[in-house]
Image (cartoon, grey):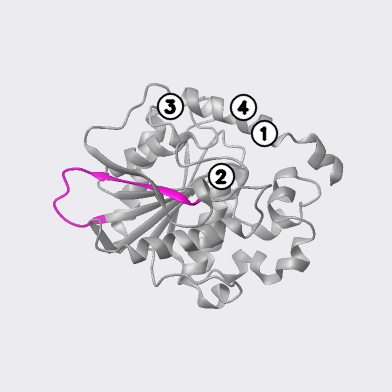
């Protein structure tokens, strides 16, 4: 474990990934038809507890909501990196909440879950300020954010699981979730601590003995879990997680749809391909996922 952690350069990798994401979005601007509210504080951890809200300017009534949980291996990512993807979702007729959360190795599990609990409590307390249809709540998350949003949805859907945690959640019910290019078996990640630098940085030493049943996310999923649109790309290195998650949800009585986009060698269907709003395949994916959400009103 020590050698693994010593050889992984978090700051260098953050800089390299940021350079790639910056190139992806170069030249993009806030659409004129989108109203955006930036850097709203929802907690006590500075920039890590800030969120943005985006929604169409021409809003005649209440809007369905999408909560975005960004990816980044638990140690990287920000709302700024996801702003154009989230505003593109908003243009499809949603109010989108795009927030930061604390990152590893500076903050470890369950810090992101604590932050999202604080974010949802803050958002619930602000009700009436924005055109929100509270009966139509949805969420998306990709990569590590896919794992986080899958666990967050369980916390909201299953009181028995939520009782394992110290923080409180607002009385919100999400109708559907987008699990995108993700990994969902937290217990399996915990078993890789000491071998995988990212999981070690996030979960810390001996997570099974420290967190126990909190790690058994998949075991607690039942028919109360929200409907799930599970997407991946044919060239996504985490694509092998999609169908097993769909099979598990089906076995537990949860409506779900698994879609694998593209073909090997196509070049536009790799990890988190859908975040690139210039990618036609990504746009197709986002159109279809939003349509899935609206079918679950």
* Residue drawn at x 67%, y 48% as measured from the top left: 106
In contact (CB < 8 Å): disc 4 and disc 3: no
Q: Which residues are magenta?
A: 49-63
Q: CA distance from mark 2 to mark 3?
A: 19 Å
Kindly state the secondary structure of the residue where label 3 is placed: loop
Q: CA distance from mark 4 to mark 2?
A: 17 Å
Mark 4 or 2: the one toward you: 4
Q: Say if 16 sits above or below 239 in the image.
A: above
In contact (CB < 8 Å): disc 4 and disc 2: no
Q: CA distance from mark 4 to mark 1?
A: 9 Å
Instruction: State the mark number for residue 25.
Output: 3
Kindly state the secondary structure of the residue where label 4 is placed: helix
Q: Can residue 91 be seen here?
A: no
Q: Say if 40 sits above or below 77 in the image.
A: below
Q: Which of marks 1 and 3 precedes in the sequence?
A: 1
Instruction: State the mark number for residue 11.
Output: 1
Q: CA distance from mark 3 to mark 1?
A: 21 Å
**266 with respect to 58 (left or right):** right
Based on the displayed image, in which of its 4 quarters is residue 129 positioned? bottom left
Instruction: State the mark number for residue 222.
Output: none
Q: Which residue is mark 2?
A: 143
Instruction: State the mark number for residue 16.
Output: 4
In contact (CB < 8 Å): disc 3 and disc 1: no
* Residue drawn at x 57%, y 73% as measured from the top left: 161
Q: Which of marks 1 and 4 precedes in the sequence?
A: 1
> What percent of the width, then of the height, locates residue 51?
42, 49
């Amino acid at each position: 474990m020590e050698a693994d952690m010593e050889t992984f350069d978090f700051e260098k990798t953050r800089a390299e990934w940021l350079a790639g994401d910056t190139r992806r979005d170069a030249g993009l601007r806030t659409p004129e038809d989108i109203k955006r509210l930036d850097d709203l504080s929802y907690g006590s951890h500075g920039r890590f507890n800030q969120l943005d809200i985006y929604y169409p300017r021409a809003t005649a009534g209440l809007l369905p909501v999408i909560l975005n949980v960004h990816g980044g291996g638990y140690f990287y990512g920000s709302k700024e990196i996801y702003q154009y993807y989230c505003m593109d979702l908003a243009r499809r007729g949603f109010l989108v909440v795009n927030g930061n959360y604390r990152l590893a190795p500076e903050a470890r599990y369950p810090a992101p879950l604590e932050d999202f609990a604080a974010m949802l409590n803050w958002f619930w307390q602000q009700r009436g300020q924005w055109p929100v249809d509270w009966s139509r709540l949805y969420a998306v998350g990709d990569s590590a954010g896919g794992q986080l949003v899958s666990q967050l949805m369980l916390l909201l859907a299953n009181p028995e699981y939520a009782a394992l945690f110290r923080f409180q959640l607002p009385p919100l019910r999400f109708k559907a979730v987008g699990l995108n290019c993700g990994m969902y078996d937290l217990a399996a990640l915990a078993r890789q601590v000491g071998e995988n630098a990212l999981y070690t940085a996030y979960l810390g030493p001996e997570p099974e003995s420290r967190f126990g049943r909190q790690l058994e996310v998949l075991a607690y999923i039942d028919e109360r879990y929200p409907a799930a649109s599970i997407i991946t790309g044919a060239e996504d290195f985490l694509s092998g997680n999609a169908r097993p998650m769909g099979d598990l949800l089906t076995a537990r009585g949860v409506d779900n749809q698994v879609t694998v986009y593209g073909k090997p060698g196509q070049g536009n269907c790799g990890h988190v391909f859908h975040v690139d709003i210039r990618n036609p395949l990504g746009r197709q994916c986002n159109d279809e996922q939003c349509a899935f959400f609206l079918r679950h009103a």
